[in-house]
């Protein structure tokens, strides 16, 4: 009788935990998968990009669903939920650091924010490449001088 009540308690706890996780996901990150891409992609490619983004989301959800039991056996039930919690925590950090607030902005203004960020990152890449090229030229010149 004691083992049966423990089994019922743990099953109830699992069901309640799953319902809480699904509810918090539905209120938190779930809408982001539909809202953020509509604001991130430029108007001229938004329809195709959204279809690709949603296809990718559904594909990954299927892969996760298909691999969950295998991963649970590999990592233990506690381990797989710890991994899920870690991914959720990293997602929160990513959203805080990289997803700009768009409340009260037009789509064109939001597009401008992302265009500016893209140009900044491209400039950083070009600067790093230029620095690398300059260092390489100096090394080649030094090698040529020592050979002569």
Image (spheres, rainbow, N blue to C red):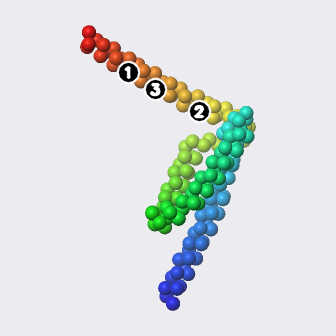
Image location of residue 12, percent across then percent down: 58, 76
Disc with the residue nearer the chain's start (3 vs 1): 3
Q: Nearer the viewer, residue 34 or 97?
A: 34
Point out residue 70 in the picture as x, y percentages from the top left corner.
50, 63
Q: SS for tag 3?
A: helix
Residue identifier under label 1 = 135
Task: Identify the secondary structure beneath mark 1.
Answer: helix
Q: Classify mark 1: residues with Cα within 10 Å, few (<14), some (14-19) or many (20+).
A: few
Name which of mark 1 and mark 2 comes first in the sequence: 2
Residue 105 drawn at (x, y percent): 71, 39
Q: CA distance from mark 2 to mark 3?
A: 17 Å
Identify the residue under disc 3: 128
- Disc 2 or disc 3, which is closer to the eye? 3
Q: Which of these two is toward me, 148 or 126?
A: 148
Q: Could you tell me residue 17's position as x and y percent?
A: 57, 69
Q: Residue at the spot x=56%, y=72% of the render?
A: 14
Label for residue 117?
2
Q: Which numbered tag is attached to residue 70?
A: none
Report crowding for label 2: few under 14, some 14 to 19, many 20 or more residues within 10 A (C-alpha): few
Would you say 141 lies left or right of 44 here? left
Mark pair 1, 2: CA separation: 27 Å
Quarter of the image where the C terminus is located: top left
- Residue at (38%, 21%) from the top-left corner? 135
Q: In the picture, residue 25 is in which quadrant?
A: bottom right
The correct choice, above or below, for 116 with respect to 27 in the image is: above
Q: How many marks?
A: 3
In the rendered image, the residue lying farthest to the bottom is 1
């Amino acid at each position: 009788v004691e083992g049966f009540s423990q089994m019922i308690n743990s099953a109830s706890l699992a069901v309640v935990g799953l319902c809480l996780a699904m509810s918090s996901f539905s209120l938190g990150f779930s809408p982001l998968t539909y809202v953020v891409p509509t604001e991130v992609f430029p108007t001229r490619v938004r329809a195709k990009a959204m279809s690709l983004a949603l296809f990718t989301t559904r594909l990954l959800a299927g892969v996760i669903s298909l691999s969950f039991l295998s991963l649970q056996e590999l990592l233990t039930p506690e381990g797989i939920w710890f991994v899920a919690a870690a991914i959720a925590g990293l997602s929160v950090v990513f959203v805080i650091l990289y997803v700009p607030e768009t409340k009260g902005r037009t789509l064109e203004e939001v597009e401008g924010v992302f265009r500016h960020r893209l140009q900044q990152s491209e400039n950083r890449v070009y600067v790093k490449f230029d620095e690398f090229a300059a260092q390489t030229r100096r090394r080649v010149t030094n090698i040529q001088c020592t050979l002569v």
